[in-house]
Image: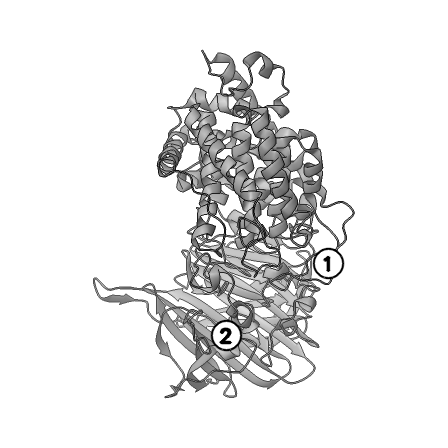
Amino acid sequence: MTKHKKTFTLIIVAVIFFMFSCKNEETAVSSDAKSEIAPTQQHPKLILTAQGVQAIRAQLGRIPIFDSSLQKVKEEIDAEIALGIEVPIPKDYSGGYTHVRHKRNWVVLQKAGLLYQILDDEKYAKYVKDMLMAYEELYKTLPLHPKTRSYARGKLFWQCLNDSNWLVYVSQAYDCIYNYLTEEERNTLETNLFRPFADHISVDSPQFYQRVHNHSTWGNAAVGMIGLVMNDQELIDRALYGIKDLKLDTKEKDDDGGFLNKDGKAGFLANIEEPFSPDGYYNEGPYYQRYAMYPFLVFAEGLLNVKPELNIFDYKEGVLLKSINALLNLSDADGEFFPLNDGQKGMSYYNSALVTAVNVSYYHGDQDAGLLSIAKQQDQVLLNDSGLAVALGIRDGKEKPFNKKSINLSDGPKGEQGGVAILRHEDIELVFKYAAQGSSHGHYDKLSYSLYEKGEEILQDYGLARFVNIEQKGGGNYLKENKTWAKQTIAHNTLTQNETSHFNGKYDIGSQHHSVLNYFSSDNENVQVASARETNAYPETEMLRTMAIIKDEDFEKPYLLDIMKVTSNKANQYDFPYYFFGQVIQTNFEYNTPEILKPLGTKNGYQHLFVEGIAKANDKNSKFTWMNNRKFYTLTTITDRKDDLLFTRIGANDPDFNLRRDPALLLRRKNAKGTTFVSVIEAHGSYSPISESAVNTKSNIKELKVVLDTAAYTAIQITDLKGNIKLFITANINTSKEEKHNLKINDKNYEWSGSYYFK
């Protein structure tokens, strides 16, 4: 237990000691009998504790954000109670009525249980009891769910994943009314509902449960949490370590193409050990990290309260709490998560799972005052011990801004499988992905990036192809275009060779490799650089990408310098897209627009790109300016007359309109072995439709030029419109901070220590 947690626990004890009176919230256990029960065996004991209940009651009416959160939940649950209980026979996919109703029920049950404990109002306990008994009556009659799409079918839901969601929440409700029920009622629920439920998602569905994946994390937490409530050590061990003595086919795959149990690892602890890097990055990406954080954290809290000897928040050097900080840093200026891998745009830290994450991190961590500012923005807290701690911190004015800084997050269990670099300066954010495959939710996008200004996308990562929980679109599940488009290399801002995706689009190959960091430097906020190398995406081809966010006093805003050095022993075609948003304003090249739109290719994502414009690039520099959200952006890229420039738009071969019709400019370089792509992206100017004034609408770059390009160094000269010249030199090898470099360019010597030179 951390020192801060101990301090807050002492506060709770003091509050209880000085309370004038307190009703006994547990009708089935007398106060004398309860005093003889060890704290770890009292109920509630998962994420809300009996001790916490007393502290909360003592503070009600004096903790504004907690009081308002409680009132909102009370109004919500009172409305549900008035509607009555409905437990329909399951029949639908995601988004369908029965799916949504059962999903709603798990939330309502959990919240009603909390209200019973905090308000000591028996109507909430009775409501939970009656609904649980309705589920007991239903569940013992259920076969497998009638929808057969999932690799692991549930009973209440079409997949075991959602069954596990249900049990994670409902175990908390059961914990809250445990002592309200008679022993006979508890035996009925445990024998006919909870134990069979836990068995179905585990021993009856090992392909779902016995693996390392966000699915199995939910399953492990579900089995473990109901085991903690029931004091069932067998279930707790099954949750922590997996199904004993079970071996699965190591070649079997799930619906997304990922291996079910390639390495034989399973259980909650393995799901902490394997997907998280020491920095707290989760290998599936922030969207699924957000999804998995809830079961990780609530089960961890339950273990801390019931099995404190496990020291779960210290496991793997405290990676669960580290992961919350990492996840918050994987969001843009608006709090929306970067859509790496399979990620839905718009998911943010306003999601309920992040309310849990922020509360838990503050309570069990170092009580970082920056977290309070996020909690204040979220405008709600959990109705439990951690929520009380946050509410008290906010009430007492302790919050400080949560400052997101440039950060390099390693990937892999030991931090040795690449990573994700985020460079930030003023309103500009660069997200540079050089990570491992990312499990079955990973994309084939080595050395890809996305660029933001004030939370708005300048150059986008497409994210996933799915309409989550919208039944009309494939039952709310992943669409075929997720594989034919969203995962493909050409869908990302990175290099595609010979119209073939990285690793030939094969998970079996991609999952064996990762990119390697060349260097990361953010010490000088005005010149921040991330550089990484990829040697396995294409046989006999090496890619080295160096990306710098530079704040130059001669430019209005920080700009991005992008250097992609490609080395190959054979001639290839290279495609280099820029997925922009907005309106084309100006180009310095002539282009033709075809009368009939045709796809750019036939496979590997190319079949989904319409060609809307065709041009030959300019000698030296090609420039393209566009406007989006009343701001201007310009791409300046080094080209020659052999290069092609293509305006493309997503949407070809998409009769169901499953894909967004987003544009791109694609630079194509044919018949090239070694080549270097160099570009600068400027953010500049603004437009007001009210005053109809346009300010600083043009690029400030006169010329972009490669002045040296060897195996050891690449040097780029940037000349602005006023004739000011800046030189950026990146070390392609020997990049340690202590390394001394001496280089002659055009009869001039340059000396520096470290990875790069800029002046």
- Outermost residue on the left side: it is 691
Q: Nearer the viewer, residue 422 or 259?
A: 259
Question: Which residue is located at x 46 percent, y 24 percent?
Answer: 56
Q: Looking at the picture, does residue 315 appear above or below residue 12?
A: below
Q: Secondary structure at mark 1?
A: loop
Q: CA distance from mark 1 to mark 2?
A: 35 Å
- Residue positioned 46% across, 72% down in the render: 719
Q: Which mark is residue 73?
A: none
The location of residue 576, given as percent across then percent down, is: 53, 76
Q: Amino acid at mark 2?
A: Pro
Quadrant housing the N terminus: top right
Image x and y of residue 351, in percent: 45, 46
Q: What is the image's colouring?
A: one colour
Tell me residue 37's x, y (percent).
63, 18
In this rendering, does residue 326 appear at all? no
Asked if residue 13 lies left or right of residue 38, the reply is left
The tag on residue 577 is 2
Q: Amino acid at mark 1?
A: Lys
Which of the two labelled residues, at mark 1 and mark 2, occupies the earlier sequence position? 1
Q: Residue furthest front?
A: 141
Question: Camera-side residue: 28 or 427?
Answer: 28
Q: Which residue, given by chain and number where applicable, does mark 1 sit on?
A: 262
Instruction: Judge the density around disc 2: few (<14), some (14-19), many (≥20) Cα neighbours within 10 Å.
Output: many
Q: Residues within 10 Å of mark 1 (few under 14, many from 20)?
A: some
